[in-house]
Image (spheres, helix red, strand yellow):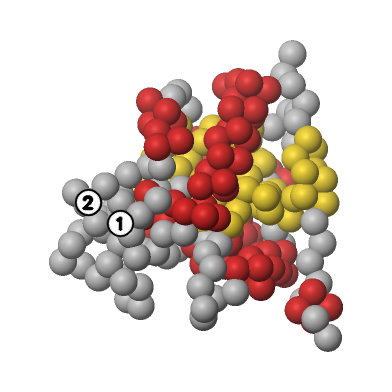
Amino acid sequence: MSLHDLLPVTLSPITLRPDVGVGLIIVDAGVAFTRQGALSDPTHMIPMVRRIDALTRRLQAALGARLQVLCFLDTHHADIPEPPYPTHGVIGTGEELMDPLLTWLEAAPGVLIVKKDCINGFVGAIDRATGENALCEWVKRHGLKELLVVGDCTDICVSDLVVSMLSARNHGLLTDASPEAERSRYVADIVNTRVLVLSEGCETFDAPFHNREAAHHVGLWVMASRGAVLVSELQIQEDV
């Protein structure tokens, strides 16, 4: 049996709901993965970045202020490793920077940049001193109910983030409603918050030990098995 038979994946066209806040989460579209360095794969990552750029501009044009964007950037200190991976994204090398095609986001309104030092962006968003999670606070602050995830790598950083977000949603970490005092709203926020993964907005690398197509497929399967909605085509109704 083929991998697709053993681990079936279903992608569907999705229309963003017109009456809720939309959060676009861009995972690791940084130079360390897209252009140069030990973990880069320009052949596959640069086309992905182009798709993300087009998607972001399309969403901004259609949704205006209803769209919020969060960009994770893998950022490391030279003397602190990230086992099991080789050195990458070190501050001062240029690898820690946003891909040139997306640097316009750094000055754009409604964009939050979160630098992380580990695979899982949900963990990387935790402030060590306060315990506050920048991702959770961003979702709650803007009342986001459609969370659309793109980036790399599908089977590593993207899937780790999405799986954690789904558990965080079900644990009530993405709502400011109290499960005791505001039970109905608390439950509604859990039920009505969708975590969407746009397949064509995600990518992974190709290597002798890592078949790109198989790894991408497995990443999608893992996320779907935890409750993510896999998107083949994103349909957007423009705000009037």
Q: What residue is drawn where x is 44% and y is 31%?
A: 105
Q: Which mark is residue 89?
A: 1
x and y, in percent, of residue 227 in the image: 71, 62
Residue found farthest to the top: 240
Residue at disc 1, secondary structure: loop
Q: Nearer the viewer, residue 127 or 201?
A: 201
Whether residue 136 appears in this view of the structure is no
| Crowd class of label 1 (few under 14; some 14 to 19; many from 20; radius 10 Å) | many
Q: Is residue 122 left or right of residue 131?
A: right
Q: Are marks 1 and 2 in contact (CB under 8 Å)?
A: yes
Residue found farthest to the left: 79
Q: Which residue is mark 2?
A: 93
Q: Which mark is residue 136?
A: none
Q: Is residue 3 left or right of residue 156?
A: right
The answer to which image quadrant residue 80 occupies is bottom left
Q: What residue is drawn where x is 35% and y is 78%?
A: 84
Q: Is residue 215 left or right of residue 160?
A: right
x and y, in percent, of residue 51 in the image: 61, 41
Q: What residue is drawn where x is 77% and y is 44%?
A: 233
| Crowd class of label 2 (few under 14; some 14 to 19; many from 20; radius 10 Å) | few
Q: Which quadrant, please, contains the C terminus?
A: top right
Q: What residue is drawn where x is 55% and y is 62%?
A: 204
The answer to which image quadrant residue 172 occupies is bottom right
Q: Is residue 39 above or below residue 137?
A: below
x and y, in percent, of residue 19 in the image: 74, 28
Q: Which quadrant, please, contains the N terminus?
A: bottom right
Q: Is residue 112 above or below residue 223?
A: above
Q: Nearer the viewer, residue 127 or 39?
A: 39
Q: Is residue 199 left or right of residue 131?
A: right
Which amino acid lies under the numbered mark 2 shown in the image of this protein?
A: Thr
x and y, in percent, of residue 156 in the image: 51, 67
Which amino acid lies under the numbered mark 1 shown in the image of this protein?
A: Gly
